Amino acid sequence: MSDAHVQAAQVARAWLRVADALLDAVESIAWDVRQRWSAAGDSAKQTARLARAGRTLATIAASYRLQSTKAAFLTEAGAIRSMQKTHARNAKRFVKLAEKLGGGFIKVGQIASARPDLLPKAWIDETTRLQDSAPPVDSDAVLALIAEDLGASVDARFAEFEEEPIAAASIGQVHRATTHDGREVAVKVRRPGIEELIETDLALLRPFLEAMAPSLPPMDLDTIADQLEATIREELDYGRERDRMERVHDFLGGVDGIRAPKPVDELCGPRVLTSTFEPGIKITTRLDEWRAILEDEDATDEAREEARMLRDRTLCRLLDGYLQQVLGAGLFQADPHPGNILVDDDGTLVLLDFGCAQELSDERRDAYKRLMRALFVNDDETAARELEALGFRTKSGDPASLRLFADALLGDLRSAMEGGDWTDPNLIVEQIEELLGATEDDPVEQIPADFVLLARVFGTLGGLFLHHRPDTSSHAPKWMAAFLA
């Protein structure tokens, strides 16, 4: 069997494990969820929801199972084309499912869309739709909710209000409006009934992680599940989000090249969050435009140089903004999927959506800074000590697998800070296999809760950097000085 056939079969089997794990998760809790919702008087709706998810995931699993066998009977080129078609069909199936069911399924799609370094192009192309274009809520329901929350009709509160949302996500949707004193604002409205959908999807989370466990490095899945559950529930609290948005807005006022909206307190309520309207284009749209110019053989040298400069500046500003949030403010936006990051006309980045945010104490910030410094200079002894102090534990107590674990999650971030010495894509699989081998021998049994969202943020940013591979050398001395001081 040729290398191409072997690779095609391996890829098919890997995706089959993911699809089967999703299906197992649905099956493992279907009756439990049915009984719970039956007691609440809503059994039919939730059973239908689980049934639809199960059917779609079973179809995806079956298609990858067939692909792993089919590859053996095709030419090399045919095996590759067949896998690409399989990815395209399954990505469409999953996105259609997410758009129909909403809730946590959209959130999964948003997270997936932020990893072009890991997922096939077909999955990125399809899940990108879920970043800000989930199915909108009926306008009458939105207007009624706003009136109830703000104590007056929409006309009384706003001079103009666009009933068609400019963005619709898993938990809320955003409408553009103008206040009576002429300010342009964004009005975020929580989806009616989203609380019940979120609770159903959260019931899937822990069994899903357990089903995925054989395909993941052994680690503290309980902490991950607890933190993700808490984070998703916090996203329903618009009062908390308003406070976080204001604090990050004030902090970023002193950071060059990045900003956040400011809440408009008098137009906020329990399910309505109004903020200044911030224009801009989604960051991945801009990055893809510049990438196309850089790959265009007919582009002029001047056009390529400008595209390269804009790409590098944008990504450096993004990383700088997050480092300053984490290490300076101790409060950071923790959902950096591309729909939440805009680039305005003058190149300033805009961070949106603070429903998912993380706070760090001064002590924790200092500890993570010391850990990163130790990783930068390859000081294994200090890195092991700091990992233990932060709350990481392996089964044996030996820090070797912890070091590999930290390198896997923070390695691309370190590459950016060292000037862009990026990982060879051909070595990524080897690194993953090394990590799996080490953690199977000595599992990571405990991780600190605050690391879950840090890993999510810097894993997502690292994937973006690895995909676009910018030159960060102009910013590297500043970042290194911050860590090594």
Image (cartoon, rainbow, N blue to C red):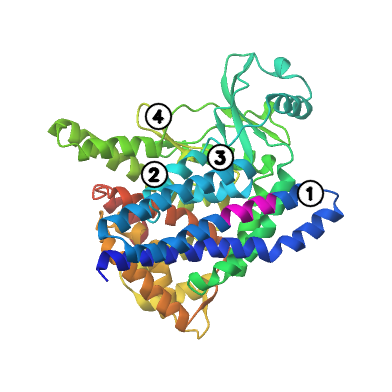
What kind of element bears circle 2?
A: helix
The residue that mark 2 highlights is: 318
- Circle 2 or circle 1, nearest the eye: 1
- Circle 4 or circle 1, nearest the eye: 1
Q: CA distance from mark 2 to mark 1?
A: 45 Å
Along the polypeptide, which appears first: circle 4 or circle 1?
Answer: 1
Along the polypeptide, which appears first: circle 2 or circle 4?
Answer: 2
The residue located at (61%, 60%) in the rendering is: 227
The magenta span reads 49-57
Along the polypeptide, which appears first: circle 2 or circle 3?
Answer: 2
Along the polypeptide, which appears first: circle 2 or circle 1?
Answer: 1
The residue that mark 1 highlights is: 44
The residue that mark 3 highlights is: 353
The residue that mark 4 highlights is: 344
Is there any visible trace of residue 24 in the rendered image? Answer: yes
Question: Quick check: 481 left or right of 298?
Answer: right
**Position in image of residue 205 (x %, y %):** 63, 60
